[in-house]
Amino acid sequence: MSPANPMNRRKDRIDELAATSGGGTATLVREAGAVDEKPGVSLIASAWKRLRRNPVFLIGATISLLFVVLALVSPFIAPHDPAVGYLLDKVRPQSNPVPGPEPGFPLGADDVGRDLLSRLIVGSQQTLLVGVVATLFGLAGGLVLGILAGAFGGWVDALVMRVVDVLLSIPSLLLAFSIAALATRATQLTVIIAVAAVQVPIFARLLRGSLLAQRHSDHVLAARALGVTERAVVFRHMLPNALGPVIVQSTLVLATSIIDAAALSFLGLGNPNDRRPEWGQMLGRAQQYIYDSPHLAVYPALCIIFVALGFTLMGESLREALDPKSRR
Amino acid sequence: MARFIIRRLLQMVGVVFVLSLLLFFWLRSLPGGTVSAILGERATPETRAALTKALGLDQPIWVQYGKFLGRAVRGDFGASTKVLPGADAFDIFLTRFPATVELSFFALLIAVVLAIPLGYLSARRANSPLDSGLVIVSLVGVAVPVFFLAFLLKYQLAVEHNVFPVSGRQDNLNCTRVTNFFVLDGLLTRELDCSVSALKHLVLPSVALATIPFAVIYRITRASVLEVLGEDYVRTAESKGLTARVIRGRHVLRNALLPVVTTIGLQTGGLLAGAVLTEKVFNWGGIGNALADAFQFRDYSVLQVLILAAAGIYVIINLLVDISYAVIDPRVRTR
Amino acid sequence: MTATATTPRTHRHGDEPLLSVRDLRVTFTRQGEEPFTAVDGVSFDVRPGQTVGLVGESGCGKSVTSLAIMGLLPTRGNRVEGTATFDGTDLLRLSGSDMRDRRGRDIAMIFQDPLSSLNPVVPVGRQVTEVLERHRGMSRKAATPLARDLLQRVGIPDPDRRLKDYPHQMSGGMRQRALIAMALACAPRLLIADEPTTALDVTIQAQILSLLKELVQDTGTALVMITHDLGVVAGLCDEVNVLYGGRIVERGERHELFAEPRHPYTNGLLASIPRLDSERAPLTPIPGSVSDNLPWTSACAFAPRCSQPVEVCTRQTPALEESAGRALRCFNPVEVTR
């Protein structure tokens, strides 16, 4: 299909991103040399040089880093156990369903008397888990399909890519809902699988695209000419060069996974077990008290927005830095 | 041009075939299989066996697939179990579809009318404070969960400050129904108060639904205009001394809007996912709300129809986008 | 130095220059980077009907010079100094809209890559008529027969059909002809051609060059020919300016310059043209590239690549010295052998 073929812009966008991988290393390095007025500056080095000065990247990276650190240390800094209903005796279903702030509980409690602040802090952990594991699952699935298509070629490639294209043509959130609906009883794992499944076709197309772009590139031809085995060519020469777009896509997927998980909770397709809180789950379930106690929804929502924005900012600035087109 | 459309239609047949296969296997892998999915888990073994035979589930899989296709073509997906017990699932789709189309239309209108001019402006003033501000707004727009934004709008503008109605599609005005597009109906029957009421109800949900398409269309427009502004033919146009207006319209926008058109098409198809969430918040009587209920209560007959419909709509929109693309881009047309 | 055997065409057209560029200097400033002077004090004249060449490698500032004269440099990130007097007015001081009125009417330009220089979604005919609509105030309908004639004049066969064609339906040579038709639509007095043949096949190059030569002779249009190819200059230009590192290093009437290059760079350029008629002389490329002189120093910009540098070359930049219709910027010019 030619670049002008409009069949599916989403496919084109993925392919464009794929094309930013190390396919044309020689030209990239040459262009980088022209920009930096020093020949031989590598793609990564020149990208890093520009990222270091890019405030968008710095903000995004800082937010993402803070989030990861918070998730790691959260059990130690949370003032209370997030699963214990300390203020349960203050909950009155009719008059006071959600206890307000009081000494020791600065944000108040939820509908079963558990400390809201602690749940938010500890919630970062499961949120990070959902984001990271969903991204890894999506990546792994995409890797298998992408390599399958890229390595076998022929009808395997055609079949895999046709299915991938059809999956891409279904609105992704709807696909996630449909897959989540397959589970009789929702758990954290089914949520992760539903969210990750949506990413599989995206990663598959991305990887296949960049593998294909490299198949005919000079460095791969050179490796072949030197008698490197096919497996070594794929794993040592082609996959590492596809890493750039994959990292970019992963950061963006981390953000969408967290948002999508919240949507699943909102529709009642999320994990019903809330002993270990997760922001999306907290937000999804807060709808029952949205008019009387909107803060129950607002806090986790702000956390999600903040973190999703952080990963998105980082991903977008990475994409820009790795895109040879933006080097002019 | 005709050859182009025929070729696209043939490609579409392939897509629909794969799609039907996917839906078929999705149905087969539902918890407890298709029978439980339709009868629920508490059905007696006798009725289960009867339905298994009636549905032909004891037959080879390719026969089953054929029958499934046959039923799908006739619009026979069985009765709703939970969303509207007893009602024909396909009828639910038909009666509720206009509401979603109306909502999506206004959401898309808002998104396009704001996103394209702002995207153009942003590109013309790249790296200005205005541009940076708009880029940040668009990034935040994508990061906010749609249903939370919907709640926020509803809470602030409907519950707290009674500016707009809280939910539903129209006040109870005894309006005449013609097409089930309420705004249009009011205009057709000269019941203008009906149209006004429908419009008021439309504001909040369509704004909520418009955020993601706005953000996406805005960013594509910005990127595309930025790219076109650096093209040689824009410099040629400048070298011919053409007026700024002609350069903007004929040389910049006309080229820059090509990718925007596909993006708009893509977003139209994707609106249904957002509509599931938005319609639920505003209790909108469309297929999005029905889908939300169907997901929540696992009403698989309704899910079948609506998912197939969603995918079908998507495929049709893709075709329309392709055709419109061929109309505006001569390179596609003559290939 | 031999006396000029042929009378330069210059003298036939009177001595009042049509375009007079003086001390043109273009500096690009990018945030966080050293300012870069792409054009550094370039001066030259173009008389009515004359064809002047600006020759040099890529990066020598020849294209920037032309864009600066046309007012087509990006509005931000650069500083343009000096004057470019056209018909009594300094183009560099004109307001945006005044310059817009002149572009396409008094001064026109054709570019290097005819495919990317044409709007892909507008029919070629429309791209010709829009110039007439703009500057002649014609309606599109009235302009169409004129556009048709223009296409015919630049040698496009079946112009009626071609009016409706899109650029991608034409061949490379045809596209460049269409671009020339657009540039000549309002019979400009000055045409700037920026590497008009570089993107074309060799046979097409020759056709386009002879077309340009014929058109400027017929219409009396002055032509500034920007190229890296001395072969193009040899067949077309009355006067040649050789640029290096943003400065003019040598200027002369075409025949004189080719017969007696004085600057080592010009000499090198001539020696690096492959010649079919002499098997004996090996091809001698000039080592290095233009970017070798960066960052800017007080030395002669060409010194690092020069075949015969002397001590003073590394300390200061030679000035451009004019004598007997020629100009030269060198401390140690090539000896005249004849």
Image (tube, grey):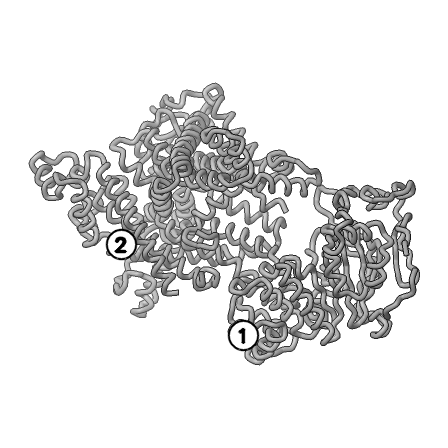
Q: Chain of mark 2?
A: B
Which quarter shows the C terminus of chain B? Answer: bottom left
Q: Residue at 46% of width from left, 48% of height from top? A: A12
Answer few, some or many: residues within 10 Å of disc 2's Cα (few below 14, many 20 plus, some between 14 and 19): some
Query: Can you tell which quarter of the image residue C213 is in?
Result: bottom right
Q: Residue at 19% of width from left, 43% of height from top? A: B62
Q: Is residue A280 visible?
A: no
Where residue C292 appears, as percent x and y from the top left, is: 76, 42
Q: Specify whether B149 is left or right of C203.
A: left
- Whether residue A53 is situated above or below residue A126 in the rendered picture: below
Q: Chain of mark 1?
A: C
Q: Specify whether B18 is left or right of A279.
A: left
Answer few, some or many: residues within 10 Å of disc 1's Cα (few below 14, many 20 plus, some between 14 and 19): few
**Amino acid found under the numbered disc labelled 2:** Arg
Q: How many marks?
A: 2
Q: Residue at 60% of width from left, 75% of height from top? A: C152
Which quarter shows the N terminus of chain B? Answer: bottom left
Element at badge 2?
Answer: helix
Q: Residue at 52% of width from left, 66% of height from top? A: C166
Front-most of C113 and C89? Answer: C113
Q: Label for residue B96? A: 2
Element at badge 1?
Answer: loop
User: Which label sits in the foreground, 1 or 2?
Assistant: 1
Where residue B313 appears, as percent x and y from the top left, is: 32, 54
**Amino acid found under the numbered disc labelled 1:** Asp
Where residue C318 appears, as percent x and y from the top left, is: 89, 49
The residue that disc 1 covers is C158
- The Cα atoms of the two marked residues, 1 and 2, are separated by 57 Å
